[in-house]
Amino acid sequence: MNRKKRRISKEKIRRVGEILGEFIIGNFESEFPVGGPSEDSHGAAESEFPVGAPPEEPRAVVEHERDDVEEQQAHEEAEDEAYDETKYYFDLADVEYCVDVAITEIIKENLVPGYNNPEKPPTLSEMFQDLFGEDHKLTKQVEEFEEYISGYEDQVHIDDLQEAHKVMSEIIKELEDWGGKQSG
């Protein structure tokens, strides 16, 4: 607990935050449905179908078309439900790749002393332990992030990815604000 921490420049700390933002947050947002408002978007597809028909069409034709549209919607909804089951799970390898790219960049730029071999990369939490100490809030947050992205049976659920995104966003914000907040 009384382990001597290495003094790392504020610029390097901020750069670590920039890399995490670019490679983890950026890749998460481009590859997975995370980062946006957590509202349900199922209503958008319904508004694409016309509510009524133009007044010049006969009523019987309109009702027949409406029945066809409703039948088609019911069929599409059944397909969407089957699809929904798979789109909420993502390959663990894709998630890990986003993190690995960030770790490799941090190593390449020599931002964390003691890690200079991209062939044997540490985990993000190991890097943060060396930067801030085992008991530091940021280290604990990185450990929480890693837990969210750990997956199950080589899959990561979207809820876990969204929570991981939130945690990483908080970490990055703290790293960007690092100047002057470093004490002790």
Image: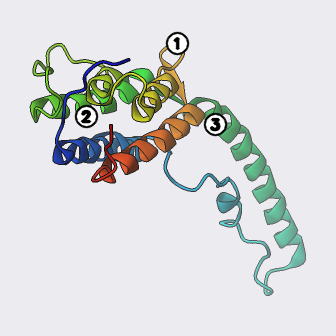
Given residues 184 and 31, the one toward you in this image is: 184
Residue 154, image x and y in percent? 47, 16
Residue drawn at 73 percent across, 51 percent down: 72
**C-alpha span from label 3 to label 2:** 30 Å
Q: Earlier in the sequence, mark 1 or mark 3?
A: 3
Pinpoint residue 71: horizontal percent, then vertical percent: 79, 50
| Circle number at residue 153 | 1
Which disc is residue 84 wearing?
Answer: 3
Q: Is residue 49 above or below residue 170?
A: below
Task: Name the spot of residue 130 as percent of width and height, x first.
Answer: 26, 23
Q: Which is nearer the N-term, disc 3 or disc 2?
A: 3
Contact, CB < 8 Å: mark 3 with mark 2?
no
Residue 88 seen by the camera: no
Residue type, mark 1 in image: Glu
Q: Does residue 165 appear to the left or right of 25 in the view shown?
A: right
At label 3, counting other C-alpha atoms closer than 10 Å, the crowd grade (few under 14, some 14-19, many 20 or more) is: few
Q: Nearer the viewer, residue 133 or 45?
A: 133
Q: Which of the labelled discs sits on residue 102, or is there none?
A: 2
Instruction: Please tell me the numbered disc located at residue 69.
Output: none
Q: Quadrant of residue 52?
A: bottom right
Which amino acid is tagged 3? Asp
Residue 161 can be seen in this image: yes
